[in-house]
Amino acid sequence: MSAEQNKQISRDLVEGLWNRRDWNVADKYVAADHLPQGPYSDQFPPGPEGVRQFAQVFIQGFPDVYCTIERQEADGDVVRSWLTFTGTHTGELMGIPPTHRTVTVRVLATERFANGKIIESLTEWDPQDMLRQLGVG
């Protein structure tokens, strides 16, 4: 797959999961042995199921969350995406009751591809900043 095709897959996954709540995109674009790295990723299984569960936990806490893809760069089998998530905390999030505060979280997602699927991802973001915005950290 070309770098542009990998960027499109990355966009389709982000927009599908976070903006359309289409859980099937994880099966379509994430390899069965996908290795996630980043805050909280060790709490979820590898592969598409872990990607789905991660998104579902945060969408439960922020039902109106929306992700904007600010920028993407591709280099061979690696895609970097700068993302901005915005949502209002109206549901429980990892034991934190709703604060009804709106947060903005910036993420750098780096994904490695093989055979048209994401095989590894590193998400870099500051969970402490999110907790501060919620007034609990």
Image (cartoon, rainbow, N blue to C red):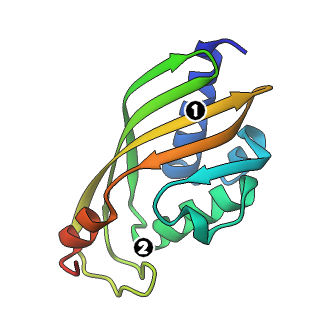
Q: Are marks 1 and 2 in contact (CB under 8 Å)?
A: no
Quarter holding the N terminus is: top right
Q: Earlier in the sequence, mark 1 or mark 2?
A: 1
Q: Is residue 34 left or right of residue 54?
A: right
Q: Nearer the viewer, residue 44 or 99?
A: 44
Residue 104: % across, % down: 25, 55
Residue 20: % across, % down: 55, 48
Helix or strand or loop: what does disc 1 sit on?
A: helix
Residue 60: % across, % down: 49, 72
- Please tell me whether residue 136 is drawn above or below residue 12 in the rendered image: below
Mark 1 nearby-residue class (10 Å; few <14, some 14–19, many ≥20): many
| Label 2 sits on residue | 61
- Please tell me whether residue 86 is drawn above or below residue 76 in the rendered image: below
Quadrant for residue 44, please give it: bottom right
Mark 2 nearby-residue class (10 Å; few <14, some 14–19, many ≥20): many
Helix or strand or loop: what does disc 2 sit on?
A: helix
Q: Residue at x 19, y 71 (%)?
A: 132
Q: Nearer the viewer, residue 64 or 35?
A: 35
Q: Nearer the viewer, residue 87 or 3?
A: 3
- Please tell me whether residue 40 is drawn above or below residue 121 in the rendered image: below
> Closer to us: mark 1 or mark 2?
1
Q: Residue at x 40, y 79 (%)?
A: 91
Q: Is residue 90 left or right of residue 16?
A: left
Indicate the amino acid at tag 1: Ser
- Label tally: 2
Indicate the amino acid at tag 2: Gly
Q: Residue at x 36, y 85 (%)?
A: 96
Quarter holding the C terminus is: bottom left
Gap in angstroms between the C-alphas marked 1 and 2: 23 Å
The numbered dot on residue 10 is 1
